[in-house]
Image (cartoon, helix red, strand yellow):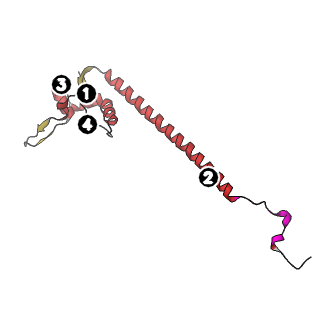
């Protein structure tokens, strides 16, 4: 046995093969990017399916509403901008469904109940989060007035 120990020659037969660490990092980065891309595609597909489901649900609600007995009424500009005075003489813009309900001698809550799906869908289609209980309505919208 030799007294001179050379660490570079230590166990030459059992040396592990050299690994290209940068190449492995590149492969891992590519795999991670591919997995993220696949996840993004799945997320987009799920979002599309949810949107289609919500649209279908709203269409069904509108269809059911149109089958309800009553008469059709098309919202006009004055329904959405009529001023009203309270007992103290304070002027404010009237609730649109209240204006429509008074025209047809029907409670605004009943008008909303008959038309909730339609009103909400119309508000969302125009960029609002909801119709605020029928406060946000648009001229040209066709409502069902209960008989």
- Is 111 on the left-hand or right-hand side of 87? right
Instruction: Tell me what residue is drawn at x 53 percent, y 40 percent.
Output: 42
- Residue nearest the viewer, comparing 87 with 43: 43
* Residue closest to the far bottom: 3
The mark that comes first in sequence, 2 or 4, is 2
Across the whole image, how many numbered discs are drawn on residues? Answer: 4
Q: Are marks 2 and 4 in contact (CB under 8 Å)?
A: no
Please provide percent x and percent y for residue 141: 27, 28
* Residue 114 occupies quadrant: top left
* Residue closest to the far right: 1
Please provide percent x and percent y for residue 11: 84, 67
Q: Which residues are magenta?
A: 8-20
Secondary structure at numbered mark 4: loop
Name the residue beneath numbered marker 3.
Answer: 104
The mark that comes first in sequence, 3 or 1, is 3
Classify 10 Å Cα crowding around label 4: few (below 14), some (14-19), many (20 and above).
some
Name the residue beneath numbered marker 1.
Answer: 140
Q: Which mark is residue 29?
A: 2
Report how far apart the C-alphas of labels 2 and 4 lie in the structure.
50 Å
């Amino acid at each position: 046995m030799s007294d001179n120990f050379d660490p570079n020659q230590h166990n030459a037969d059992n040396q592990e093969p050299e690994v290209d660490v940068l190449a492995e990092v590149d492969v891992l980065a590519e795999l991670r990017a591919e997995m993220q891309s696949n996840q993004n595609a799945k997320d987009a597909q799920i979002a599309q399916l949810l949107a289609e489901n919500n649209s279908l649900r709203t269409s069904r609600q509108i269809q059911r509403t149109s089958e309800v007995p009553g008469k059709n009424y098309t919202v006009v500009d004055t329904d959405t901008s009529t001023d009203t005075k309270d007992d103290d003489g304070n002027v404010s813009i009237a609730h649109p469904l209240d204006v429509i309900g008074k025209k047809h001698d029907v409670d605004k809550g009943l008008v909303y109940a008959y038309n909730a799906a339609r009103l909400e869908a119309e508000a969302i289609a125009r960029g609002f989060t909801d119709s605020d209980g029928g406060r946000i309505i648009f001229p040209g919208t066709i409502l069902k007035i209960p008989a």
